[in-house]
Amino acid sequence: MITFLLQHKTKWNVFFGISLFFISFLISLVLVYIIKKYAVKLRLVDPPGERKIHTRTMPLGGGIAIFFAIILSLIFTSFLYHYIFSNTVLDVSRQMMCILGGGFFIFLVGVIDDYISLKPRTKLLAQVAVAATLFAFDIKLTVFVNNEIFSFVITVFWVTLITNSFNLLDNMDGLSAGTAFIVGLILIWVMVPLGQWQVVFILCALLGALLGFLKYNFHPASIFMGDGGSLFIGYTLASLTIYADFYQTNFPYYAVALPILAFAIPIFDTVTVSLYRWREGRPIFQGDTNHFSHRLKKLGLSTKQAVLVIYFITFATGINATLLYQVDDWLGAMVIVVQLVAILFVIHLLEHTAYVSKSKE
């Protein structure tokens, strides 16, 4: 049996990845429906406000369905693995267990925030604590610099940046979940050839849960994911990209930049909206309607059109990032990076021109 498994390892891994996706998808569909039905009774609601674009009280809790769909699908698939390969246990590393444990903690913080609205500082401290725990379990970024302090700083920075990026991106129907789905697809595309199957399995479960949630969250949404979902999604993607080995001896060193390009649009949204708030003298974590999606609506796009535009831009920048493994020299890598910068600059130019034109009217 072990010989058979080794000979057909890739095929079976693909089978388990696909199984995880569909099981998670089905569980998510059912759980979101149930949570949506009882959200009001559970006081999981998001009332309208001046810094929000929805005009009626919306049920929250989609993130609860996403989290449990992932966990339950992983448990079910583990039993399936054990049944097919009798008495063989699906290997899960100590570091991956740390990532899942950190995800549970971030999920709890988000759900509590959905109930009682925690201070931004409290949520940030929770993210720093989880990032520090990842570092303690040797899940860390180095960027070829052999310095523990530097490694700790950039690890914490990356986790908090990506976690908050998807939290901030959750400002329009289907936006955060759909963008995370596309980024996850890009990462799977890269991780499969690299043989990073533990990362692929978690991503497959995440994508299935997101797709099940999007059935109810795409415009017009009937439920929101809440911070319990957006924080968990951002943390999971951030930690998996740290855990994954993007640099291997047979690949160029600049391949480590792939996650930055894959997350370009969430990062772009976070940076630009933070600059807007800083320039206006408002707290960076104070909600408003100056996000990338809101700015697209101000250009005349509908909610659905704005979300779809961001989907396509995310895909364009992400799929371009996968070419980092194909180019043979740093000049080729620079072309990819310059193309990304050019796309973002064109977006900024169009937004700025429209803003100036409307100001003159």
Image (tube, rainbow, N blue to C red):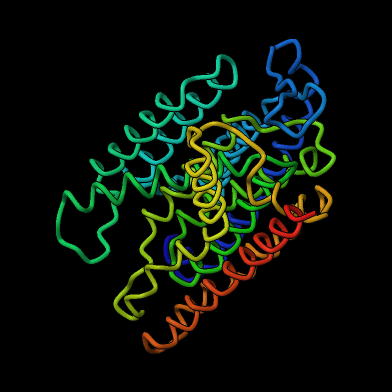
Q: Which residue is rendered at x = 17% and y = 49% of the image?
A: 149
Q: Can residue 9 be seen at all in this image of the molecule? A: no
Q: Is residue 108 above or below residue 256?
A: above
**Residue 300 on image: x %, y %:** 82, 54
Q: Which residue is rendered at x = 47% and y = 71% of the image?
A: 7
**Residue 105 on image: x %, y %:** 43, 28
Question: Which residue is more in the foreground, 316 or 289?
Answer: 289
Q: Which residue is rendered at x = 72% and y = 39% of the image?
A: 213
**Residue 26 on image: x %, y %:** 74, 41
From the viewer's perspective, tell me whether residue 147 is left or right of residue 184.
left
Residue at the left extreme, as displayed: 147
Question: Which residue is more in the foreground, 153 or 294?
Answer: 294
Screen quadrant of the C terminus: bottom right
**Residue 186 on image: x %, y %:** 57, 64
**Total number of numbered discs in the rendering:** 0
Q: Which residue is rendered at x = 58% and y = 55% of the image?
A: 16
From the viewer's perspective, tell me whether residue 244 is left or right of residue 271.
left
Q: Can residue 271 be seen at all in this image of the molecule? A: yes
Q: Is residue 228 above or below residue 94?
A: above
Q: Quadrant of residue 143?
A: bottom left
From the viewer's perspective, tell me whether residue 245 is left or right of residue 212.
left
Q: Quadrant of residue 253?
A: bottom left
Question: Which residue is more in the foreground, 87 or 122?
Answer: 122
Question: Which residue is more in the foreground, 231 or 118?
Answer: 118
